[in-house]
Image: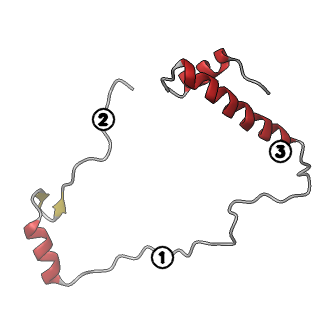
Amino acid sequence: MPLSNDDVKYIAKLARLHINDDEVEQFSEQLSSILDYVAKLQEVNTDNVPELQHALDVSNVFRDDVEDNCVERTRNIALENFSNRNGDLLEVQSVFDRNENL
């Protein structure tokens, strides 16, 4: 499935890629090859094939989330050495920015 130069430029714009005219030709060939391969995969009959989540037969081993107390001395040292704290609570830098304009 050959892609036109306009198609490649549009895909590059969607991906926020800045490409020059030489790269348009190169990506046109590469993207066309990928789409041809996907078209070939679409022809494969997968009616009786079970869904696969992972290529290897692996499973996660989860443990119960159990609170475990540390030695009082270790706890006190950690609290004393932490720069931002409010009583026994440790204040850390926020992970998410609060942006009211979203």
**How far from the left and from the top, in percent, is residue 71?**
20, 84
Residue behind mark 3: 41
Residues at circles 1 and 3 in contact by the CB criterion of under 8 Å:
no
Distance of label 1 from label 3 (alpha carbons): 42 Å
Most extreme residue toward the front is: 22
Residue behind mark 1: 64
User: In the image, what residue occupies the spot 32% across and 42% down?
Assistant: 96
User: In the image, what residue occupies the spot 48% across and 23% down?
Assistant: 18
**How far from the left and from the top, in percent, is residue 23?**
56, 25
Q: Is residue 67 left or right of residue 88?
A: right
Distance of label 3 from label 2 (alpha carbons): 44 Å
**How far from the left and from the top, in percent, is residue 10?**
60, 19
Check disc 1 and report its element: helix, strand or loop. loop
If you read the primary sequence from the N terminus, does the residue marked by circle 1 or circle 3 appear first?
Answer: 3
> Which quadrant, please, contains the N terminus?
top right
Q: Disc 1 marks which amino acid? A: Asp
Q: Is residue 91 left or right of residue 69?
A: left
Residues at circles 1 and 2 in contact by the CB criterion of under 8 Å:
no
Please say which color scheme the image uses. Answer: secondary structure
If you read the primary sequence from the N terminus, does the residue marked by circle 3 or circle 2 appear first?
Answer: 3
- Residue 3: numbered disc: none
Q: Residues within 10 Å of mark 3 (few under 14, many from 20)?
A: few
Check disc 2 and report its element: helix, strand or loop. loop
User: In the image, what residue occupies the spot 55% across and 18% down?
Assistant: 21
Q: Is residue 36 left or right of residue 72?
A: right
Residue behind mark 2: 98
Q: Quadrant of residue 4?
A: top right
Q: Residues within 10 Å of mark 2 (few under 14, many from 20)?
A: few
Q: Disc 2 marks which amino acid? A: Arg
Q: Residues within 10 Å of mark 1 (few under 14, many from 20)?
A: few
Judging depth in this view, the residue of 74 and 24 nearest the camera is: 24
